[in-house]
Amino acid sequence: MNQSQELKVFEVSCRVLGTVHSIITNLPTKKLLINQIIAIVFNAVLIVPTILLNGVAVVTILKCNQLKSKPCYFIILLQSVNDLAVGVLGLPSFIYFLSTGIGAASNCIIATLAWRSTLIPMAISVFTLLVMTMERYIAILHPYAYVTQMTKRRLLIFVCTSVAIGFTASVLSFAFNRFLKMYVLAQISIVFIFIGFAYTRIFLIIRKLKRSEARPQVAFSAENMTRKKLFLQEIKQAKSCFIVVLTLILSYLPTAIFIPFSLNVDNNKIQYLANKTWSVSFGLCNSSFNSIVFFWTKTLLRKEIFKLLKGIF
């Protein structure tokens, strides 16, 4: 019996919004079954740090008025809320989807919905980090516009728009099977291109600043010294945001590489399933990495978290 015949025995199909979807309810090889069980355990363990780390960050920022008042920390709050949603909704949904492969669940419609529920918070996370990059870009390259244009209300609108886009794309993917893959690929590509452009410009500004510091200094007024100090603080914030973005790129790189090769899976569905399992798992790790990077790079946030934990324990 060849591979396609084996898969037909273990597949269950269902119709959602007029389109046929299928899930594998029993993996045909022992090697793939072990791979699936390891992935389930890995993602189950990942739930704990994702919820705890992001939960602490959310509570800390909400309790500290100084953190809430700054746009950069407000974006961190939005990102942490979404990453918390990954732990509460995304990871359990993905575990349920993976469990269909070992025969623990066989409802095709629920499994299909669980798969989409996994991808929605991941897509929002990418958009939120895009907004974070935009906020740093405007703060450094257009500081005067930053004061008037970069308000918490506008940042919230940007993130809410990303939620609407991600939800709409997920719904459309029910009717068009390939739409979701093409959408995710386009989203990741656009985000990576903009992030590369933004941080290249920021890097050039930093290099220009260092060159000016190496030249003979002239007398600066107190106002100019204050502006320079604030500008250096914005650059420091940009460096920490760049580390967060770098972890995003590393986490989503397997997905970005995998998607173009997954548009035609008829020839090797088994290999496709194994690759999809781990590419998404690495992407979900980003929600824990974000909170760790925020903790170690944001001095004020770290101090407030220590105060919160000290008050609790």
Image: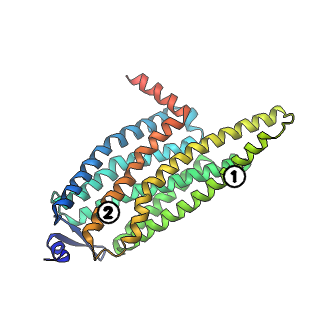
Residue type pointed to by label 2: Asn
Residue topped by disc 1: 204
Mark 1 element type: helix
**Horizontal placement of 60 versus 237: left or right?**
left
Instruction: Using a 10 Å C-alpha cutoff, classify the residue at mark 1 as few (fewer than 14 neighbours), some (14 to 19) or many (20 or more).
Output: few
Measured as percent of width and height from the top left, residue 152 is found at: 59, 46
Chain-order first, disc 2 or disc 1: 1
Residue type pointed to by label 1: Leu
Asked if residue 171 can be seen in this view, the reply is yes
Residue in the foreground of this view, choosing between 192 and 168: 192
Mark 2 element type: helix
Toward which corner of the image does residue 12 lie, by quadrant?
Answer: bottom left
Measured as percent of width and height from the top left, residue 78 is found at: 49, 46
Residue topped by disc 2: 275
Residue in the foreground of this view, choosing between 53 and 163: 53
Measured as percent of width and height from the top left, residue 308 is found at: 45, 27
Toward which corner of the image does residue 230 lie, by quadrant?
Answer: top right
Instruction: Using a 10 Å C-alpha cutoff, classify the residue at mark 2 as few (fewer than 14 neighbours), some (14 to 19) or many (20 or more).
Output: some
Real-space CA distance between mark 2 and mark 1, rounded to the nearest whole angstrom: 38 Å
Q: Residue at x 18, y 59 (%)?
A: 33
